[in-house]
Amino acid sequence: MAFMIEECRKRNMEFHAWINPYRVKTNNTKELAQGHLCYQHPEWFVQYGNQLYFNPALSQSRDHILKVVSDVVNRYDIDAIHMDDYFYPYPIDGMDFPDEEYYARYGGSFAGKADWRRNNVNILIKQLHETIRSIKPWVKFGISPFGIYRNEKTDPLGSKTNGLQNYDDLYADVLLWAREGWIDYSIPQVYWEIGHPAADYETLIHWWARHSENRPLFIGQDVERTVKHTDPKNPSSHQLPAKMALQRSYQTIGGSCQWPAASVVNNVGNYKNALSEHYHKYPALVPVFDFIDNRPPGKVKKVKSVWTPNGYVLFWTAPKARTEMDEAVRYVVYRYDTKKKYDLEDPSTIVAITQEPWYKLPYEDGKKKYWYRVTALDRLHNESKSVVKKVKL
């Protein structure tokens, strides 16, 4: 993880530590390390099907998960803790999760087992949020839930779909977590195609956009399925253009997450090229989570251009900060032709997003004038006012 964080920092990327806390064994034929917790406290664990899980009903399970997350947040320079879509396990036909004994012991105040199970998960989500905030208030907590909250036939609030449900089958009340402020963003896994008979992508995009619950919302995309299926309205194209147009038509959708990363790297269906040459052609600043912090850092100081043995370099110094939340951790460098009006909302003018307090200028013959504007970003990407310097290149 330290290596991954270091590489992300070199590329000015955030690092979100993606965890899957309840699941211990994905296959019971696999051996765990001899010192694993399940050998020390076998009473904390439950076997379901061919897998082993922490028992969500036990405070000991939650305490251990919190201990692990606390360790990660304390020791690593992460930007977020991110939970996968596994809460109570995906149901196996004809097999109930074996927690009747614990429901009899702890579930007496609930109307039914389903409410009790949801409450078990709710407690963990709330405790995770509080734990993360208490250690590093800038570290976010996100969830990547299964793509269907509830079906409309189950609940009028649900989507016009017919599939497994977060609320009823995984006991994950994602909307409650967002409403209560226990999570900071959501990336629902809307992995189906446009026109899927049970879980149509377009139907689900509309639903999630209307139910963001005032929390940042991003869409989980299945790269392979997107390029495998043609656009119903344009059979000569796969579905990436249509999906991007749909998600960008909603102000409440802030972007998307591509899965799996290998398919992007391998440029399946020309997917990577489409992102880099069209949809994400210019650098982008990470969305500001202003409900956590909306105070920008101060302006950079002493912006000057200097000839060095390594070339022509623009230097500046970091602004002073009263708290760690206010510190500048990276900088944005914009460039404009002096004859044009500047616009910090235009990403095509961004020439660098950097952790360093300098930028090497692309000197040519010293005959053309440019404005360079430098801003500072804090840990939550609040952007300072700009400081300008005219340079001849």
Image (cartoon, rainbow, N blue to C red):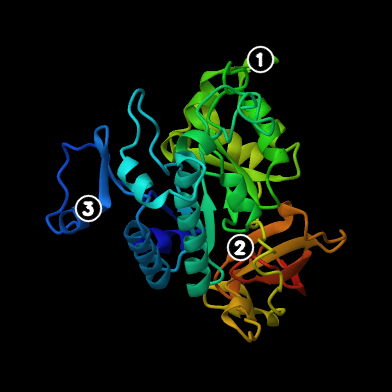
Q: What number is the disc on residue 244? A: none
What amino acid is at disc 1? Answer: Pro
**Which of the two labelled residues, at mark 2 and mark 3, occupies the earlier sequence position?**
3
**Which of the two labelled residues, at mark 3 and mark 1, occupies the earlier sequence position?**
3
What amino acid is at disc 2? Answer: Ile
Q: In the rendered view of the protein, which quadrant contains the C terminus?
A: bottom right
* Residue drawn at the location 62% of the way across and 38% of the way down: 277
Circle 2 packing at 10 Å, graded few (<14), some (14-19), many (20+), is many
Viewer-nearest of discs 3 and 1: 3
Left or right side of 320 for 355: left
Residue 349 place in picture, x, y as percent:
73, 56
**Secondary structure of residue under mark 1:** loop
**Which of the two labelled residues, at mark 2 and mark 1, occupies the earlier sequence position?**
1
**Secondary structure of residue under mark 2:** strand
Q: Nearer the viewer, residue 312 or 111?
A: 111
Q: What number is the disc on residue 353? A: 2
Residue 307 place in picture, x, y as percent:
61, 78
Q: What residue did someone put label 3 on?
A: 43
* Residue drawn at the location 57% of the way across and 66% of the way down: 354
What's the distance in space between the residues labelled 2 and 3, CA to CA?
50 Å
Residue 226 place in picture, x, y as percent:
55, 26
Q: What residue did someone put label 1 on?
A: 232
Left or right side of 136 for 232: right
What's the distance in space between the residues labelled 3 and 1, CA to CA?
52 Å
Q: Classify 183 as above or below 219.
A: below
